[in-house]
């Protein structure tokens, strides 16, 4: 393909999709073939400034727009997302690699956040308390905070941007988005649909780039809040730099999610759920169940787990019947394969080896098949690092207490699951395990948007989580008004110099 014929990703500035004037471009690859399918600019300083200026100018009129008008825009938006779900999913599969069915799930989970945002009139209600003193009432308003920004990862090109700008904007903020430079296409179509739904020019601006764009967002004084989702090194940096500059920052980061298998669990369900949650999306989910702890005799189920995992079909995401697509890049493949080798070198047993998986017709793709390492111990690199690939590491424990201690000693706290038919075991687990999101016979317990995404410990920095009531809090501030209306004959007769109580 002639390089100049590769489509370029536009910037969205002040309501216009424009070509960047930058001289620095990054290639976007189809992970199933490694062909270049597009190019994305590293926005220039001038372009980034223009984007924030546009957000700043749009802020006052947008925050003054009636809440019902903002609601109407998002009601139209959710319908447009539904109408275009296939198109959005195709873009995700092209740039990210996951299967089309999984890509639709990616859009669908984001759509649910938009649907939640449509209940904004009740979500923005303040509180009132009449007669807190003689003739005196107090009430609160929930108000937007200004220009907000979102920095997204590659693994959920629809869902994660949709955790960000719809909630921020429906509250009355304007929004600057920086999608992952590896998968910008879906965000651009989502932005076009929002424009079609009636969002005024300047309410959503989009810049592209890497570190320079991220640091620009952390430093620009007009930006009041940053939502970040991605890896720990980036998330820690953004949290520190943004907070130092006086911004609110919520930072969702990496994970090592454990599934605890009790001997009393429903064997068939548990094995299927482990396989789906470890290898779905090629393990590139922050809530992937990447670590299994078999308690007691449940370890006898390992051969069946291996057999079931073997039956998954590795293929390009747009091919019929594909279960496991490619990894995002050749570098990711090398990294995942070297972590598998490190497990072998450190004494783990390779029960299933997905390296050298050959996918006919896609020989240049970044494929790694389902891989299982057993006999893993906590000091091994394949346990201490987030692998972010289709690799299940298996540990064993004699008791539930031992399993809980292991998990609580792991620095991450994103998600976990227990498989059991015993209510008391499940209750003990949910109370004692120090992880923010817990599934009981549910392998990937990502909460629906009426709740919040509550990863904890090393998986999160900040104090207010994404979406749900916490998401509304993140994107709003409270103004409290105390007023006194006395009858005309009740005049204050002398100055009150003591603290009113
Ligand atoms: P990433 O950190 O490489 O990239 C995320 C964003 O940060 C991108 O927009 C990128 O341009 C920017 N970035 C990357 N490195 C940076 C740096 N050093 N300084 C400043 N900015 C930087 O993450 P990724 O590879 O796109 O996504 C995978 C990671 O995201 C995994 O660790 C996964 O667990 C995590 N994740 C977490 C959640 C969650 O909710 N906890 C959800 C999805 C993904």
Image (tube, rainbow, N blue to C red):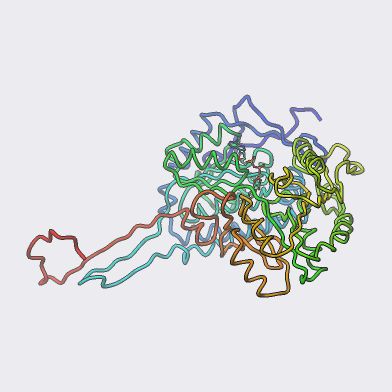
Say if 273 sits above or below 286 in the image. Answer: below
What percent of the width, then of the height, locates residue 47?
Answer: 53, 32
What percent of the width, then of the height, locates residue 280?
Answer: 77, 54
Nearest to the observer: residue 240 or residue 394: 394
Nearest to the observer: residue 276 or residue 305: 305
Q: Is residue 24 left or right of residue 260?
A: left
What percent of the width, then of the height, locates residue 443?
Answer: 71, 62
> Which residue is at the far right?
360
Q: Is residue 436 left or right of residue 309?
A: left
Say if 170 sits above or below 4 in the image. Answer: below
Q: Quadrant of ligand 1?
A: top right
Quarter of the figure with the N terminus = top right
Corner quadrant of residue 128 = bottom left
Corner quadrant of residue 24 = top right
Q: Is residue 145 left or right of residue 334?
A: left
Say if 186 sits above or below 445 in the image. Answer: above
What percent of the width, then of the height, locates residue 419?
Answer: 73, 67
Quarter of the figure with the C terminus = bottom left
Tag count: 0
């Amino acid at each position: 393909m002639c390089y100049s014929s590769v489509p370029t990703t536009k910037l969205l500035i002040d309501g216009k999709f424009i070509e960047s004037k930058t001289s620095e471009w990054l290639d976007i690859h189809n992970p199933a073939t490694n062909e270049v399918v597009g190019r994305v600019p590293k926005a220039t300083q001038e372009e980034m400034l223009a984007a924030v200026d546009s957000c700043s100018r749009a802020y006052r009129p947008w925050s003054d727009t009636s809440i019902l008008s903002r609601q109407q825009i998002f009601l139209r938006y959710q319908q447009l997302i539904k109408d275009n779900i296939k198109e959005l999913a195709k873009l995700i599969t092209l740039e990210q690699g996951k299967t089309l069915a999984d890509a639709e799930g990616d859009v669908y989970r984001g759509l649910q956040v938009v649907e939640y945002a449509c209940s904004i009139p009740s979500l923005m209600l303040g509180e009132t308390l009449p007669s807190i003193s003689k003739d005196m009432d107090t009430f609160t308003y929930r108000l937007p905070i200004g220009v907000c920004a979102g920095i997204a990862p590659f693994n959920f090109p629809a869902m994660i941007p949709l955790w960000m700008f719809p909630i921020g904007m429906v509250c009355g903020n304007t929004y600057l988005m920086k999608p992952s430079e590896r998968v910008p296409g879906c965000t651009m179509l989502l932005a076009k649909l929002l424009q079609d739904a009636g969002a005024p020019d300047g309410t959503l601006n989009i810049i592209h780039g890497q570190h320079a764009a991220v640091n620009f967002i952390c430093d620009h004084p007009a930006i009041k809040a940053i939502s970040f989702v991605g890896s720990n090194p980036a998330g820690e940096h953004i949290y520190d730099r943004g907070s130092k500059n006086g911004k609110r920052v919520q930072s969702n980061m990496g994970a090592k999610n454990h599934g605890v298998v009790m001997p009393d669990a429903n064997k068939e369900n548990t094995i299927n759920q482990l396989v789906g949650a470890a290898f779905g999306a090629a393990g590139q989910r922050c809530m992937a169940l990447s670590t299994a702890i078999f308690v007691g005799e449940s370890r006898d189920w390992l051969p069946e787990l291996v057999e079931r995992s073997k039956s998954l079909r590795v293929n390009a995401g747009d091919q019929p019947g594909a279960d496991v697509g490619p990894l995002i890049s050749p570098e990711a493949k090398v990294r995942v394969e070297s972590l598998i080798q490190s497990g072998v070198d450190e004494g783990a047993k390779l029960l299933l080896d997905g390296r050298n998986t050959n996918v006919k017709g896609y020989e240049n793709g970044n494929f790694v098949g389902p891989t299982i390492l057993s006999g893993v111990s906590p000091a091994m690199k394949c346990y201490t690092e987030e692998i972010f690939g289709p690799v299940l590491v298996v540990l064993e424990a004699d008791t539930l207490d031992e399993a809980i201690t292991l998990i609580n000693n792991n620095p991450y706290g994103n998600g976990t699951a227990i498989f059991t038919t015993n209510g008391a075991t499940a209750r003990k687990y949910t109370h004692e395990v120090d992880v923010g999101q817990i599934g009981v016979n549910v392998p990937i317990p990502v909460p629906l948007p009426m709740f919040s995404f509550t990863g904890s410990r090393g998986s999160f920095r900040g104090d207010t989580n994404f979406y749900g009531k916490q998401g509304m809090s993140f994107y709003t501030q409270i103004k409290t008004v105390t007023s006194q209306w006395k009858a005309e004959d009740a005049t204050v007769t002398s100055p009150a110099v003591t603290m009113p109580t």
